[in-house]
Amino acid sequence: MKNGFWIFIAVFLALGGSWCGFVLAPELQLGGAKQTTVLNTSDVYPVGRPGEATQGSSVYRANGCAACHTEQVRQTGMTCGVTLTEAGKNPQAVTNLISSLVLINLTKEAADAASAKITAGGGKTEIHITATGPDIARGWGMRQSVAEDYLYDQPVQLGSLRAGPDLANAGARADANWQLLHLYAPKSEVKGSAMPPFRYLFEVRKIGREPSPDALKLPPEFAPPAGYEVVPRPEARELAAYLLSLRANAPLYSAPISP
C-alpha cells in the first residue's frame, strides 16, 4: 500500500490534535486551579464539602440526578447601580445632583462616571454589580458558574438536560427539611412536579412508643397509614446534605456580583 505511511501520519496527527485539544489544553488551563479569594474579603473559595455531603455526591450520581438537572448557571450580561452611602456636608446639593442622574441599569463605565460626579459634589457612593440572564432571573443563581465552583467535585456533574431546575445554587434556596420532603414526595412541595419520588431512600415503619424526631411531617395526602412514620435512610440524608452544599454564590474576581 503506497500511501500507508501518509495515512498513518494523518490519523496520528488527527488523534494527537484531538487529544491536545480535549485533554492537554484543559489540563494546562485548569489542572493547577487553586482556591481563590472572595471579592473584597480575605475569605477563600471554595471550601471542601463536609463528609456527609461528599457521600451524597455519590448518591446523586448513583440515582442519575444529572440526567434531569444541570449544575451550571448561565449569565448573559451584567448591570451596575450606584447607591449613595453618605450625603456629606451639603446633602441638599447632593440630592439635587442625584435627581439629575441615572443610577440603575448602567454599564461599569457609566456607573463610575456617575459615582465620580456624586463624589465631586461631596457625597460617598457604592457601586453594586448585578448579573443578568434567564437563569439568574429564574432565581437559579446570583452569577455565572466558573471553574472555581467545581474545584472539589470529582467527577463534575454538569448535566445536559433541564427537566428540573438547575441546582448549582440549590443550597441557598431551601433547607434540609424541604429537601427531604421533596425527595420523598416531590408534589408535596412543587405542584405538578415531574420528578419521580425517591421513596426507597426512606423507611416506612410503625411508630414506637414515641414518634421519631427525624420522621417527615407530610401533608395528609402523602402521609403513611395511621400508626406509621417515614424516616430518611442515611442515603437520603447524604443526598440532602449534598444538595445543601451546592452554594455557588460567592462574588469572585472572575464572576463579580454584589450580594
Image: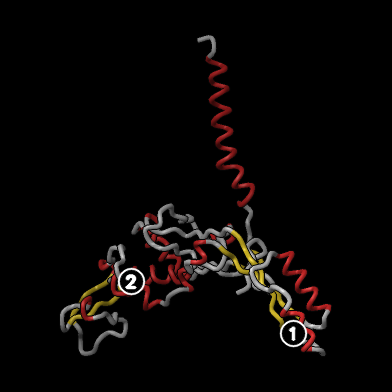
Q: Amino acid at mark 2?
A: Val
Does any portion of residue 64 appear in the rendered image?
yes
Along the line of sight, the residue nearer the viewer: 41 or 195: 195
Where residue 189 appears, x then y in whole percent? 33, 74
Along the line of sight, the residue nearer the viewer: 163 or 211: 163
Q: Which mark is residue 254?
A: none
Q: Mark 1 or mark 2: which is in front?
A: 1
- Residue visible at 45% across and 72% down in the picture: 244
Query: Which residue does the numbered mark 2 point to in the structure image?
Result: 190
Query: Which residue does the numbered mark 1 point to in the structure image?
Result: 95
Q: Residue furthest top?
A: 2
**Quarter of image, res 164:** bottom left
Question: Are the residues tagged 1 and 2 within 8 Å (C-beta)?
Answer: no
Where residue 167 appears, x then y in whole percent? 45, 64
The quarter of the image holding the C terminus is: bottom right
**Quarter of image, res 117:** bottom right
Q: Is residue 46 above or below residue 87?
A: above
Along the line of sight, the residue nearer the viewer: 133 or 57: 133
Q: Amino acid at mark 1?
A: Thr
Query: 10 Å neighbourhood of mark 2: few (<14), some, or many (≥20)?
Result: few
Q: Residue furthest left?
A: 226
Where residue 159 appears, x then y in whole percent? 44, 54
Q: Is residue 68 above or below residue 47?
A: above
- Residue visible at 67% across and 67% down in the picture: 106
- Residue visible at 64% across and 47% down in the picture: 28
**Quarter of image, res 69:** bottom left
- Residue visible at 82% across and 83% down in the picture: 122
Q: Secondary structure at mark 2?
A: loop
Does any portion of residue 44 appear in the rendered image?
no
Question: N-terminal of the two: label 1 or label 2?
Answer: 1
Along the line of sight, the residue nearer the viewer: 68 or 191: 191
